[in-house]
Structures are given as C-alpha cells and as structure tokens.
Amino acid sequence: MTSTDSALPSPSAGLRFRFPHPLTLLVACILLAAVLSHVLPAGRFDRRDDPVTGRSVVVGGTYHAVAAHPVGAFESLVAIPRGMADAASVIFYVFLVGGGFAVVERTGALNRIVHWLVQRLERREVLMIPIACLAFGLGGILIQMQEELIAFVPVLLLLTRRLGFNAVTAVAMSLGAAAVGAAFSPVNPFQVVIAQKVADLPAQSALGFRLLILLPAMAIWILGVMRFAVRTRTLPERAEAAEVAALNGRDRIILLVVLLTFAGFIVGARTLGWDFDQFSALFFLMGVVAGVVGGLGIAGTAEGFVEGFRSMAYAALLIGFARGIYVVMNDGQIVDTIVNGLFTPLAHLPVTLSALGMMTMQAAVHFPVPSTSGQAVLTLPVLVPLSDLLGMPRQVTVLTYQYGAGLCELVTPTNGALMAMLAATGVTFGDWLRFLGRVYLPVVALAVVAVIIAVMVGVH
C-alpha cells in the first residue's frame, strides 16, 4: 500500500476534499498559464551576459512592452513535450537512478542492509528522524539537493516501513529537510551565492547571521517531523526470511559500491562541476557493478534496470509536465510582466513592510519560475535598485529572495522535483500539504522574524 491517506487524521471520507491527481493539476496549471498569456500584457526586461555569475541577468529599469504572443490551446499542449525536452537531463537521471537501485534491490543486499540498520535502532527508532534530517539538510545546505534525492527513495521507503513510519515521513526527513537547509543556507551555491553575486555582495557575507537563523530553522523542522512520525507510527513491516539473513561478503561489497557512488556524487557536485548527465552515468555504473557482484548476470542486471525504469516513469514524466508551465509563460512573454507587476508597488511602502512584501512576492514568483537560480537572476536586478532607493541593505534583499523562494519549494506544484519525489514515494500532494500544515508555518514565521531583525540591525 503506497498511499498514506490512512495514516493521516482527517474528517470523514464524505467531507474530505480530494486534491486533483498530479497530472491533472499540472495540466490545469499549463492551461491557466496559456489563459494568462491572453489576459496579461506581454513585456520584457533587457538582459546582459554577466561574467561573474556566468548567466544572462535582467537589467533593472528596462521593462518594456513587446508584441503580444498569446499561447493557444494546442500550443500549450505542445509545451508538454517541449518541457520534457528542456528537462531531459533530469528525467534521464531519474530513470537511471531508479534502474540502478532496482538492480541493487534485486540482489537482496538492500533489504539485508536495512534489516541490519533496523536491528541497530531497536527501541530507538525515532532517532532515525534527526539523523536523516541532519544528513539530508546538510545536502541542501551545501549543494541544494532536490532531484538528486530521488536516488534515496528505495532505501528510505524500506527503512521507514521497517521502522513503522509512513512515506510522508520519508519525504519530510529527506526532501523537506534538504529544502529547509537550502532556504536558510549561508553557502548554497545555486541560491545565496548566485544572489549575492547578482547583488554585488561579497560571497558568504552575513555568514554569522544566516547560521544563527539556520540552526533554529532546522530544529523546528526536525521536531515537527519527529512529532508527526511518532503520532502516525504503525506496526513495523515484518522482515522476510531472506532479509533477516546476516550480511554476506557480496552484500558488503555492494554496500561499498553504493557508498562510493554517493561519495563520487558529492565530490563531483562540489569540486568537479558535474551535472545530471555525469550523475546519471554514475548511478548506471553503480547498477552494473552491483548486478555483476550480486550474481545477477547480464540478463538479470538488464531486467533490473527495466524494472527500475518502469517504476520511475511516472515520477520522471511529472518533471517534464512541471517544466511545461514555464515554457508556456515564457512563450507568452508574461514572466517579466508578472515580476514587474508584483514588485513595483513595493517602492511606496516603509522599509520593513517593503522587505516583507519582497519575501511574499518572491514566494509568488516562484510558482511560475520554479528555478531558484533562475529566479535570482530575474528578480534581484529589479529589486536591488529598489532597495537602494529605500535605504534597505542589499543583504536584506537577498534574504527576502532566499527565504521566499526557498521555502516555496516545499509547496508549489510547479516544482518538478517535489512532484517527482511524491510520486516515487506514493505520497499524494494533498497528504503532503496536510503534513505541512503542522510544521510549515513555524518555519515561515522564523523567516519573517529574521527579515524584520535584519532590517532593524542593518545586516550587510
């Protein structure tokens, strides 16, 4: 049973609101984007190539109207395969990760390793929550892990089921913790570092302030996940006889291969500039080696990959559908119009209210622009001159972007990584939002307080 509906307290089935199927929701968002291209005026900012960030960034104050380009109904559907093409490297990564781990699982080593871990956590099962949250949170802090976390789904689901926790807990202590870590990170290269470069601030400036906010943010999230996990815990899944067997030499070698794969992943991301193409090749190699070591042979290894591809097809497709929303808005020339319309009124507010308004608007912009790095180069060139006019420190402007966009990663259905992770774990979007109702608001409240304090003390 993959759905977690039964684990979450809710009203009677007759009164309970059912969220649309993820594919239905994403197609509706694509069609809504097409409708908006007929309603909103088309416009664009001028752009320039920035050698510091290596990206094309907006030139502030250059917004102007352009010829309307409304997107028709059929064109909006064409945006779906175009979105898949745009997200091809991520989609292939998801397929190859699923295939690699399906091979590992087929050897039986994964089940026996999980059983070994469960034995070590006997009567201390809840300790798994903070350990996992801190590990994945560190991944978010250092390299903003999101799509990469799909690689951990097989292990997470096995482990949580054997400990009696549900799939929502698996998502919360992995993707959830990573998103919170990334949102409050002082060193996230794809968010705060790019934003500081665009705002012409020293890299890792205001490091101490961000660390002071990061620590309680992670504590709030971990405590919330622990409370939810304990309250929804059920009887642990029983281990099969093959899983109870002691680890053998092949299992240890396969475990070493998996650990070396993740070590290579981290080194590649941090120091070698690897992207999803290299990560995909790495997990494919892991599956091949695991299949050979595990005695599956060429045919058994190939069958394992096919099984993994099949299990990840739905999750991979959701990433492409989500990307299609941005494709429609970009074709309709309304992304810049939305940004200009949301941020222009902030110039007439007091500094503190303007800062909070920036954070709110950054969250709103993240729905049509689900890339945090893309959002940085789109919005900050508009906001930095505005903050200078208001006498607001540029660091505060970066904070409003970081918290607004980063925390929105947890709730927006246009975030392909979130939707793919939910699909891979069998968690419905509705159940995820119901879980967030218990832990999300305190984290957002902390971000609001942090922005107010940053304005008051003049963080630079």
Image (cartoon, rainbow, N blue to C red):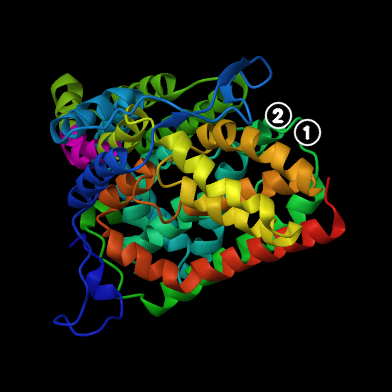
Residue at left offset 20%, top offset 27%: 81
Q: Is residue 172 above or below residue 147?
A: below
Q: Is residue 328 above or below residue 183?
A: above
Residue at left offset 35%, top offset 63%: 432
Q: Where's residue 456, x and y in %?
A: 83, 61
Viewer-closest of 312 and 70: 70
Mark carried by residue 197: 2
Identify the element where label 1 is drawn: loop
Mark carried by residue 201: 1
Q: Disc 2 marks which amino acid?
A: Lys
Residue at left offset 48%, top offset 61%: 120
Q: Disc 1 marks which amino acid?
A: Leu
> Quadrant where the N terminus lies?
bottom left
Q: Is residue 241 above or below residue 254?
A: below
Q: Where's residue 177, x and y in %?
A: 52, 55
> Quadrant where the C terminus lies?
top right
Viewer-closest of 314 and 83: 83
Q: Where's residue 271, x and y in %?
A: 62, 22
On screen, residue 113 versus residue 126, left or right, reads left
Task: Report if residue 316 lies within the magenta region.
Answer: yes
Residues in magenta, as a range: 307-319
Going by the picture, which residue comes out furthest to the right? 457
On screen, residue 165 versus residue 131, left or right, reads left
Residue 454 visible at all: yes
**Mark 2 touching mark 1, by CB under 8 A?**
yes
Q: Where's residue 172, x and y in %?
A: 44, 59
